[in-house]
Image (cartoon, rainbow, N blue to C red):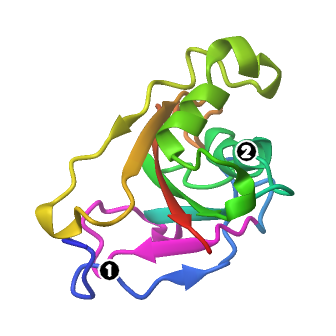
């Protein structure tokens, strides 16, 4: 992937503990974190300055509801990537997930306002998906889609964090 090279990023870290946005939960564990080799943003605590990924299995026993509640909502509530404006969801999609395993169709349908009010995903917090522009050398790979979510918590300095854009990569499993 262009830009994701070892001269820019350290090796990914798996399940490393971080605190949530207010420090009350000190053992949150995003599945993967990619940190930069250097600190271009000048963030004081580099544990919170990275590309955070949460991974979920999608199949007959792990529905899209779990992907939302135990994945997306961790970013929206400020458990993961609270100091960042973007992060990643990775779905491992098994055949038992159903006939339509496309992330754009399934996510847009699931997160539409008329269906998801009970999960606190509303028109204001879930936007339409868009396909990212893919470099020619990656055109045969699964597409990446993005959603934008509002966040209501406050940062330690009292400021609002702003929206977070989540990238969704769904990898088919056989």
Please identify the residue farthest to the top as the structure is shown.
114
Quadrant location of the N terminus in the rendered image:
bottom left
Mark 1 surroundings: few (<14), some (14-19) or many (≥20) residues within 10 A: some
Is residue 110 one of those drawn in magenta? no
Q: Which mark is residue 9?
A: 1
What's the magenta region? 28-47
Is residue 43 one of those drawn in magenta? yes
Quadrant location of the C terminus in the rendered image:
bottom right
- Kind of element beneath mark 1: loop
Please identify the residue farthest to the left as the structure is shown.
136
Q: Is residue 38 left or right of residue 117?
A: left
Q: Is residue 156 left or right of residue 137?
A: right
From mark 2 to mark 1, how far is it between C-alphas?
31 Å
Residue beneath label 2, please? 64
> Which residue shows up at 69% across the image and 11% down it?
114
> Which residue shows up at 58% across the image and 14% down it?
123
């Amino acid at each position: 992937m262009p830009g994701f090279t070892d001269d820019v990023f350290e090796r990914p870290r798996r399940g490393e503990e971080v605190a949530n946005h207010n420090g009350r939960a000190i053992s949150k564990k995003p599945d993967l974190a990619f940190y930069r080799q250097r600190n271009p943003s000048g963030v004081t605590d580099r544990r919170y300055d990275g590309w955070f990924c949460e991974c979920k299995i999608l199949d007959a026993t792990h529905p899209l509801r779990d992907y939302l509640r135990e994945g997306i909502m961790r970013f929206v509530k400020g458990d993961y990537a609270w100091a960042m404006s973007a992060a990643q969801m990775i779905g491992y999609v098994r055949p038992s997930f159903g006939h339509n395993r496309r992330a754009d169709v399934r996510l847009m349908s699931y997160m539409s306002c008329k269906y998801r009010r009970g999960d606190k995903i509303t028109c204001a917090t879930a936007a339409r998906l868009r396909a990212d522009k893919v470099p020619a050398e990656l055109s045969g790979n699964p597409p990446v889609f993005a959603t934008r979510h509002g966040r209501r918590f406050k940062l330690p300095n009292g400021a609002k964090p702003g929206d977070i854009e989540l990238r969704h990569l769904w990898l088919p499993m056989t």
